[in-house]
Amino acid sequence: MVDLSLENCTGDANRKLYYKRRSQIKANMEECLIDLLNVLYVLVFRDSPAFVASPSSHLSRYLTSSDVGTKFGMLQSSTPCKAEYSILLLGLDNAGKTTLLSSIKTLYSSTPAPSKPTVPTVGQNVSTIDLSDMYLKIWDVGGQHALRSMWTNYYSVCHAIVFVVDGCDVGDGDFASPVENTSAMNGHSHVGRLEECRKTLEEVLSHPSTASIPLLVLANKQDREDCVETVRIKEGLVRRVFEGERGGGVRDSRVLPVSALKGDGVKEAVEWVRTRVKWNREGREPVMR
Ligand SMILES: Nc1nc2c(ncn2[C@@H]2O[C@H](COP(=O)(O)OP(=O)(O)OP(=O)(O)O)[C@@H](O)[C@H]2O)c(=O)[nH]1
Ligand SMILES: [Mg+2]
């Protein structure tokens, strides 16, 4: 504790000491307040796309000004209560999940994601888009085989699942196709990774925590000529899973064509998710923030 009582300050030297200590304490208190505001600010804005893109510059923009009152006012006025729904992007590695997330950010954020080549995701990417009636918090998790066991950690908190399929890597989308072309395809199966896709989707839907969660399957890479028709993915993959023993019961579902790279169909996909999470609101409540 610093003794600030004026009685102890006799003479010039002591008076100087008094003022010095007083200004030190004032500076310390300001620092504490700024720290407190920093914490509040991070809590409020940590998921905003601009903040995720550049946390340090974003923080300094608001918190280095000396007008603490103004800053506090900004925090208060920036906290409307809105529903937040979490969307989980799943699918095999190379399906296009990260590209899709980047495309969504570009379409829905004022600070579009820089267009750069993706790298295989190890761990997760997350972005929140601010729609008029809700926040959509979108989780993009790595699809490599070794990472898929981590998907289950997200099941109980997600409000919809978007399963991305590489439409160029499922052959003609038909398990029943003849196999004579296999050798002509350098040893690759004529159905590409269709079977792996089917098993993976089955695995997801049969998990108890995903029961009744809306499912959107995206037939991605539609811009490529070798992409299979969406109806093939619907019949050859999705219907097969739903009709199987591990289809996971009744849920809202849809198969849509997209090109994550070009952005085609992405708005329709987001719109579908937006309506379905609302319809399922009682089944899984949003977070209010
Ligand atoms: N032509 C085309 N290429 C795409 C499309 N979407 C993704 N790609 C490409 O597919 C490759 C893999 O895309 P990613 O978004 O990294 O795939 P991912 O699903 O995130 O992969 P993991 O992180 O390993 O799970 C990249 O080279 C993308 O450019 C698309 O719509 N069209
Ligand atoms: Mg990725």
Image: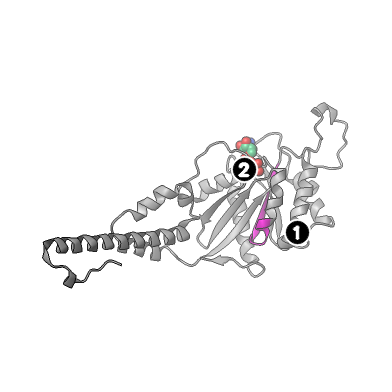
Q: What residue appears at the point 48 percent right and 45 percent down from the top-left corner? A: 112
Asked if ligand 2 lies within 8 A of label 2, the reply is: yes
Contact between marks 1 and 2 (CB within 8 A): the answer is no
Quarter of the image that includes the N terminus: bottom left
At a point 72% along the width and 44% down the height, the residue shown is 145
Ligand 1 visible in quadrant = top right
- Residue 263 or residue 25, whichever sits in front: 25
Query: Mark 2 belongs to which amino acid?
Result: Thr
Q: Which residues are magenta?
A: 153-166
Q: Position of residue 53 (x, y in %)?
A: 47, 47
* Numbered label attached to residue 207: 1
Q: Quadrant of residue 122?
A: top right
Where residue 63 appears, x then y in whole percent? 35, 55
- What secondary structure is marked by label 2? loop
Which disc number belongs to residue 121?
2
Question: In the image, is residue 160 part of the stretch drawn in magenta?
Answer: yes
* Residue 230 at x, y percent in the picture: 72, 45
Quick check: 97 left or right of 65?
right
Residue 12: image quadrant is bottom left
Residue depicted at 38% across the width and 59% down the height: 35
Residue lying at 77% horizontally and 53% vertically, measured from the top left: 203
Residue lying farthest left?
11
SS under mark 1: loop
Q: Mark 2: give few (<14), some (14-19) or many (20+) Cα within 10 Å.
A: some
